[in-house]
Image: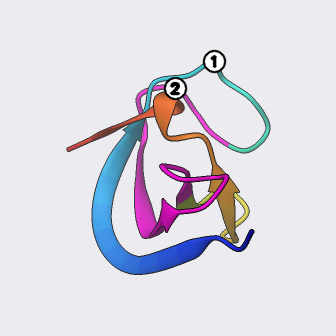
């Protein structure tokens, strides 16, 4: 089954544990959201390296 992705632009705060890709409580840009398929609810977020990857939405909150 294929994921259906919707392009969006909004700011989110990382609320997960600090890691190489994100700093806790820092604001990042969400550039897409999976709206259907097995990864529904996952977010495309521009990380510390400036690259957008798919991440679990539970680690972020919208600001």
* 9 vs 21, nearest the viewer: 9
Q: Check the image and name the residue furthest to the bottom.
A: 7
Coordinates of residue 25 in the picture (x, y in percent):
41, 28
Tell me which residue sits at (63%, 40%) in the image: 22
Label 2 element class:
loop
Is 48 rendered above or below residue 9? above
Tell me which residue sits at (53%, 53%) in the image: 40
Q: Is residue 37 magenta?
A: yes
Coordinates of residue 20 in the picture (x, y in percent):
79, 38
**Left or right placement of residue 26 versus residue 46 in this view:** left
Q: Which residues, given as a range, are shown in magenta?
A: 22-43
Q: Residues within 10 Å of mark 1 (few under 14, many from 20)?
A: few
Is 14 rendered above or below residue 55? above
**Left or right placement of residue 38 versus residue 33 in this view:** right
Coordinates of residue 28 in the picture (x, y in percent):
43, 54
Q: Quadrant of residue 46?
A: bottom right
* 56 vs 15, nearest the viewer: 56
Question: Does the CB distance between marks 2 and 1 fall below 8 Å?
Answer: yes
* 63 vs 2, nearest the viewer: 2
Coordinates of residue 54 in the picture (x, y in percent):
67, 58
Find disc 1 in the rendering and name its residue: 17
Q: Check the image and name the residue furthest to the front.
A: 1
Quadrant of the frame with the C terminus: top left
How many numbered discs sit on the rendered protein?
2
Q: Is residue 5 magenta?
A: no
Q: Which mark is residue 24?
A: 2
Look at the image and name its color scheme.
rainbow
């Amino acid at each position: 089954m294929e994921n259906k992705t919707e392009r969006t632009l909004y700011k989110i705060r990382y609320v997960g544990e600090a890691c190489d890709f994100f700093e806790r409580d820092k604001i990042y840009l969400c550039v897409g959201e999976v709206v259907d398929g097995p990864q529904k609810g996952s977010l495309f977020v521009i990380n510390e390296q400036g690259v957008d990857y798919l991440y679990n939405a539970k680690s972020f909150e919208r600001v």
